[in-house]
Amino acid sequence: MPIPRDARAAGSARSCTLTGMPTGCIPARLQSLTGVTTDNAIDGVSRITVDTGGVINLYKAATLAGFTAAGTKGIQATTFTYGLT
């Protein structure tokens, strides 16, 4: 599944999610991936999960850490490959 451009936004929560996934891309079980996320203009290799509800959950690090509460957070343009079954 492609993320064609950087997706960043300001927010006050420690979590960051992407919603609105096309039905055909929703996996039958939780998928755990690695990607590059941004927390207050600092990029880092992070854990990303895609759940069975079609929500992409972004984390600040591979340890599932939350983002800084204030500031911008998001993900760099990328393509994810994961199983649907």
Image (cartoon, grey):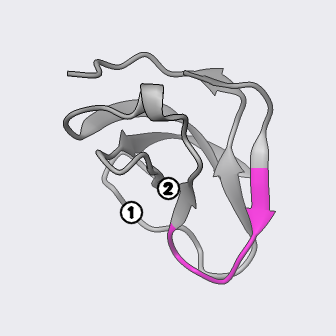
Whole-percent x and y of residue 20? Answer: 59, 48
Q: Which residue is mark 1?
A: 65
Task: Please name the predominant secondary structure of the magenta segment in the image.
Answer: loop
Residue 60: assigned label: 2
Q: Examine the rendering and report whether any part of residue 68 can be seen.
A: yes
Amino acid at dot 2: Lys
Dividing the picture into quarters, in which one does residue 59 lie? bottom left
Residue in the image at 29% along x and 36% along y: 32
Q: Tell me the quarter of the image containing the C terminus.
A: top left
Q: Is residue 26 left or right of residue 10?
A: left
Marks 2 and 1, the one that precedes in the sequence? 2
Q: Contact (CB < 8 A) between labels 2 and 1? A: yes
Query: Which residue is painted at 30% across and 32% down in the image?
Result: 27
Crowding around mark 2 (Cα neighbors within 10 Å: few <14, some 14 to 19, many 20+) is many
What's the distance in space between the residues labelled 2 and 1, CA to CA? 5 Å
- Rendering coords of residue 75 (x, y %): 65, 43
Residue 29 quadrant? top left
Magenta region, residue range: 8-15
Answer above or below: position of 22 versus 78. Answer: below
